[in-house]
Image (cartoon, rainbow, N blue to C red):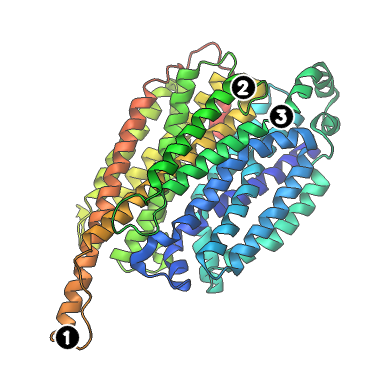
Amino acid sequence: MADRRIAIGVGGTVVLLAALDAYVITTIIVTVTQDLGIPINRLERITPVLTGFLLGYVAAMPLLGQLSDRFGRRAVLQACLAFFALGSAITAYAGGVPLLTTGRVIQGIAGGALLPVTMALAGDLWEERQRPVVLGTVGAAQELGSVLGPLYGVGIAAAFDDWRWIFWINLPLTAVAMIAVQFSVPGGRPQEAAGIDTARIDAARSNAAPVNAERARVDVVGGLLLALGLGLLVGGLYNPEPEESALPPWGLPVVGAGLVVLVGFVLWEARSRTKLLDLTGVRRGPLFATLGVSLLSGAALMVTLVDVVLVAQTLLEKDSVDGALMLTRFLVALPIAAVAGGYVARRIGDRWPMVVGMAVAGVGFLLISGWPADLENASYGPIPRMDADLVVTGLGLGFVIAPVSSAVLRFVPAAQHGVASAAVVVARMMGMLLGISALSAWGFYRFRSLTADLQMPLPFDEGFKQKLTAYQAALKDALRTQYQEMFWVTAALCVLGALLALAVTVRNEDPEVSDSARDELLTR
């Protein structure tokens, strides 16, 4: 018993390590651009650094999870940790955007496997009745990364006075993690690794031998199609020169090709014997609606993590530490609402907490979009407006987390709880990836169009100081308009998520729901 708890504890720790690195860049983005010599009005050049990690994370997660079925959990965890360290070293050493992006992609690919492999490890070591609570604990480590990541990044950067230490410090952390994995996680294939478990689980495993044999197959084609489709979408949305249009000249053809490949992925999954996620006997409409809510909440989350910090640093002229502190209003509200959403969903079902959460988040983004120029002095009576709006938004998005995870577990049999939980995270990360790609493409295009007629005054111009002041004020007005429009779009995405949540028809009293699945809500 103790051995398997240590094993899953180590697995949860490496999941947290990867999740932290998914979000560390958001609060130091301006610092990184300055260090790389990128002008503040050309932030579009740093977009691949944000999307690279997310793309690798999402694309690798399903396929590498299946590889662990074939080669064993310990072997895949060790390989992923080694590549995570390599990606961290490349990121820390990078002197330009291409190498920095390469390092982040490698980190993402390696980090993306850690969650499904650890969830699969829980399936190996715990019987079906106890498994949901363990899966919830692993999922909680993933969620904790979204809360602590931005603060962790800015904290390390401030402590060492260098953002690169965020990634250098991963090398000793990864080495310790590899040692812990070696001595705690069972080796060999999953059916062999279960030897540390009880005799009853051994008996259950022996009765399920045909299933394990089938699961040992790997859907390489499906994994590659998903990765290629997402890569094409992100590549088509990235515009290094947004002066003329929101998309680059190759944008529409590449995005179209990405959509075609993703359709091919869906068709392949419908016909393939080995699937990334087997939906046999699952009610697909409510399941896809729930995953859609997860996707849209992920897009809204990423916009908040990136743009609130940019507002702080570009409009309010705060440093990275103050920008992260400004974001804490949102980050503190997020886990509080996640716990509250779990309790409410346990009593009234999953649908209405999702509807209310996405609707409240939409209201929060509308409030943020109306932030005035003198934001620091704006208030609702005694409450600062900035604090109140960020708390409302965090409460809304946080309220959705537990009901989404719970609903997905209700739709699939217990044997697929691990992959279903991973699917929730994949959907959220896909939302973060595509959301920040699409909104950034539009936002940077709008900023360039709004500032196209501005001319920076020269030092020898008559009235230089007055002209410079007017120029800087015009730049801030353009930035404010850009942020306003992005928050409008994000509010619309939240409203769409609330409408999708109405299609999630599972009720709390549904007889298919086990007590252990309900209890998982309290662990997230």
Q: What residue is pinned by disc 2?
A: 278
- With respect to residue 231, does 371 lie above or below? below
Q: Determine which residue is flagged by label 1.
A: 461
Residue 134 higher or lower than 172, as above or below: above
Q: For residue 213, which quarter of the picture?
A: top right
Q: From mark 3 to mark 1, how far is it between C-alphas? A: 71 Å
Q: Amino acid at mark 1?
A: Asp
Q: Residues within 10 Å of mark 1 (few under 14, many from 20)?
A: few
Q: Nearer the viewer, residue 102 or 388?
A: 102
Question: Which label belongs to residue 123?
Answer: 3
Mark before the other along the chain sequence, 1 or 2: 2
- Is residue 384 visible in this depiction of the protein? no
Q: Residue furthest top?
A: 511
Q: Percent position (x, y) of residue 519? A: 57, 27
Tag 1 secondary structure = loop
Where residue 347 sits, quadrant-wise, is top left
Residue 219 visible? The answer is yes
Distance, label 2 to label 3, CA atoms, is: 16 Å
Relative side of 326 to 113, left or right: left
Residue at image location 23% in from the left, 66% down from the top: 475
Answer above or below: position of 225 versus 80. Answer: above
Quarter of the figure with the N terminus: top right
* Pointer 2 or 3: first along the chain: 3
Gap between marks 1 and 2 measured at Cα: 68 Å
Q: Amino acid at mark 2?
A: Asp
For the C terminus, give its image quadrant.
top right
- Secondary structure category for the residue under label 2: loop
Q: Nearer the viewer, residue 65 or 320?
A: 65
**Which type of secondary structure does the marked residue at label 3 adopt?**
helix
Return the mark for residue 177.
Answer: none
